[in-house]
Image: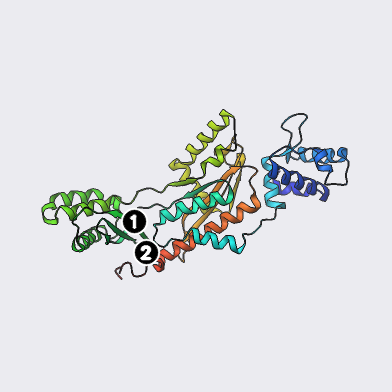
Amino acid sequence: MTVSSLTHDLDQRARTVFRQIVETYLAKGEPVGSRTLSRNFDLSPATLRNVMSDLEELGFLFAPHVSAGRLPTDRGLRYFIDGIMESGNLNPVETAALEAQCRIEGRSVEDMLEQAGQVLSGLSASTALVVAPKADKSIRHIEFVSLDQSRALVIIVSEDNLVENRIMPLPAGVTPDMLKKAGNFLSERLSGKTMADMRHAVMQEIKTRQHELGELTTTIIESGLALQTPDGKLIVRGRSHLLGDTGALEDIDRIRDLMQQLESKEIISQLLDEAGQAKGVKIYIGAENPIFKGTGHAMILTPYTAGTSQKLIGAVGVIGPMRLDYARVIPSVHFMAEMISRRISDLYSGEAYKGSFDPAP
């Protein structure tokens, strides 16, 4: 029997009692007993115990110890989130602050995602996860722009018009002509191809043409080829929130194992696929996802997209104890995903870097 079908078995009194139990648990993290509940209801402890017993039979509550109060089960939390909880909204001051903290001007996409993870971790008091997009895309244009005598801005335009800016150190003596020559050399050879596909061939070519290109130009080309990472990755911010929520050594070991699983390529790919299939925010409660089995944790995840086609790029979310403040964290994750999507869509349109380059038509 599904959670949705079980809701028909709850009368209004049972729903109200259940809601009070879950909200008290989310606030305090402790079992809730009938005496605690009787302070908020005009019902005797005996009546409340009967209601709690019915909720336990439905699989919504359990008793961690014989004489303890009750805690919500994974199924109970799912019912509360889907059928009872009312999500809050971020106020205008909060949204403006988030927009300001995660602005992308002058940053690479990865830097912006790193900052978004840091901000979301602080906002939710949880561990933030950002599945970063795969960086090694087919190249349309690459350009080196001098910032000063020791640094250059590398502007990489992918075939789908995503613009990536990186800062690269320069050896002494590099001239603007050398930077232009290096950019033209790479643009011609990488056009329509990825750096991973062409890295070996280009490195072989510059070895045979090093005398013609010159030592400094060769160094610039080699540094440019080394900039992009070939795989997407999981950005994790606020790990201390997970470790700080537990004290037992065995619990800490489980958290470490969980983080190792999350950072594996297979799990990153799985999270991205599941986020892409979700309509909005996807919530995992405890053992609903095998990687959280036995850890007592939950995850909230939602995809972010780019461009008018709403192409799936990555995902953002948080992981924390099952007593997360869902009503606040869910809209926070949703807003962060929307903001990242807008920022990356600006890059697709070139609005964030107008004037930085003149891509081929």
Residue under pointer 1? 166
Task: Work out whether mark 1 precedes mark 2 in sequence or the reverse, and give the earlier one.
Answer: 2
Tell me the SS state at disc 1: strand
Tell me if residue 274 comes above or below residue 92 in the rendering. Answer: above
Q: Amino acid at mark 2?
A: Asn
Q: Quadrant of residue 181?
A: bottom left
Residue at point 73%, 48% (across, down) = 5
Residue 51 left/right relative to 313: right
Residue 358 left/right relative to 341: left
The dot on residue 161 is 2
Q: Is residue 279 visible?
A: no
Of the pair 29 and 15, the residue shown nearer to us: 29
The span from disc 1 to disc 2 (Cα, nearest Å) is 16 Å
Tell me if residue 3 comes above or below residue 217 in the rendering. Answer: above
User: Which-is-in-front pick, marks 1 and 2?
Assistant: 1
Q: Where, quadrant-wise, is the C terminus in this rendering?
A: bottom left
User: Residue 113: where, in percent of width, then height?
Assistant: 45, 54
User: Residue 319: where, in percent of width, then height?
Assistant: 56, 44
Q: Amino acid at mark 1?
A: Arg
Q: Residues within 10 Å of mark 1 (few under 14, many from 20)?
A: some
Residue at point 45%, 40% (across, down) = 264
Tell me if residue 192 comes above or below residue 274 in the rendering. Answer: below
Tell me the SS state at disc 2: loop
Q: Where, quadrant-wise, is the N terminus in this rendering?
A: top right
The dot on residue 268 is none
Residue 213 left/right relative to 192: left
Residue at point 29%, 54% (across, down) = 168
